[in-house]
Image (tube, helix red, strand yellow):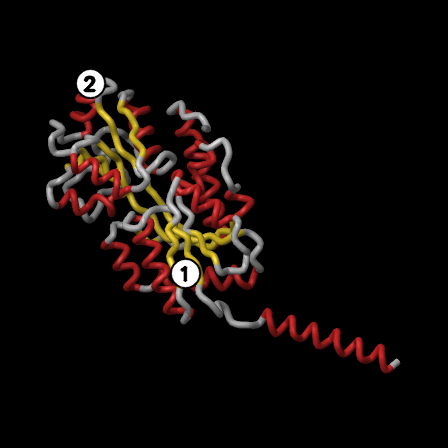
Amino acid sequence: MPKMRTVGVVAVCFGLACVAAQAQPYPTKPVRYIVPFPAGASPDIVGRLMSDRLSRIWGQQVVVDNRAGAGGTVGAGIAARAAADGYTLFQCNIASSAIAASLYAKLPYDHTRDFSAITRIGTTASVLIVHPAVPVATVAELIAHAKANPGKLSYGSSGAGTSPHLGMELFKTLTKIDVVHVAYKGAPQALSDLIGGQVPVAISNIPAYLPAIHTGRARAIAVTSLKRASQLPSTPTMDEAGLKGFEVTSWYGVCVPAGAPAPLLAKLHADASKVLLAPDVNQRMTEMVIESAPTSREEFAAFMRSETLRWAQVAKGAGLNPQ
């Protein structure tokens, strides 16, 4: 009997130790925040804002880890293989979490299976731009110029499978123009070559190209949202320019590797939402031409599923087959 009581006491103590361990505050060490695009690109700017504010809330460093490549899928694959303990956050996005499923035959992850949604961060429109030497100032003039020079114009994007890539492919499909795609490793490289005149056309997220537009190194033709961008008030929307209903908006969110316990997921959602609802964060995002758009976990998961279906249809219409 004494021996059995000892075993019982040990078992109870072990159980209490487990409970105590589970009750430890999170986080107790630095957290990795994977951004699957290069430093300086729009997703990176958003990621650094989020990581800074989460660091303040948690009293622990949240370190941005840029893992660029293959339209965000390299970083997504790394995040998917991480432990589901809350110490790896992934900045999910339109490229890796919606478009990629239609363009890559073999991905190192399944976004629906391998990730848990936390919240959408925000959305941002793109802008159709040209190098100043291109003799066009409107969407109609660009279409006419492209049709007069089939296959002679090229457009740059931040990588195959990104929203700038699919946005331009949608534009090509609707207008029946022939413009050659040049994929870069990120928006900074694509911008550099557009400014240099190596590629005359691009559709890209507004934040990355705004300085070049304001300094005259790039000409804005139209924005891809259904309403004009506050930072480009004189630039019409694609809808106003004649492509009725045309809308391409990029988005960012927070996801974690699947399998994290429900209390941790709830805490991550609550703290990320606290960041996104802060007035100063909203102001900073507005300055970056990003509309803060936090959601519940369920709403964000449903949103990503709908986006995956939408871009699958665009890819099919453009004749883009999985590679």
Q: Name the residue at 47% across, 68% down.
A: 29
Q: Name the residue at 15% across, 37% down.
A: 219
Indicate the amino acid at tag 2.
Answer: Asn
Q: What's the mark number on residue 149?
A: 2
Q: How crowded is mark 2: few (under 14 residues within 10 Å), some or many (20 or more)?
A: few
Indicate the amino acid at tag 1.
Answer: Ser
Mark 1, secondary structure of its residue: helix
Image quarter where the N terminus lies is bottom right
Left or right position of 12 against 286: right
- Report, in whole angstroms, how far the alpha carbon at label 1 lies from the one at label 2: 49 Å
For the view shown, which residue lies furthest in the right direction? 1
In the image, residue 1 sits, relative to residue 198, either above or below, namely below
Mark 2, secondary structure of its residue: loop
Q: Position of residue 248 (x, y in %)?
A: 32, 38
In the image, residue 56 sits, relative to residue 106, either above or below, namely below
Q: Position of residue 288 (x, y in %)?
A: 25, 52
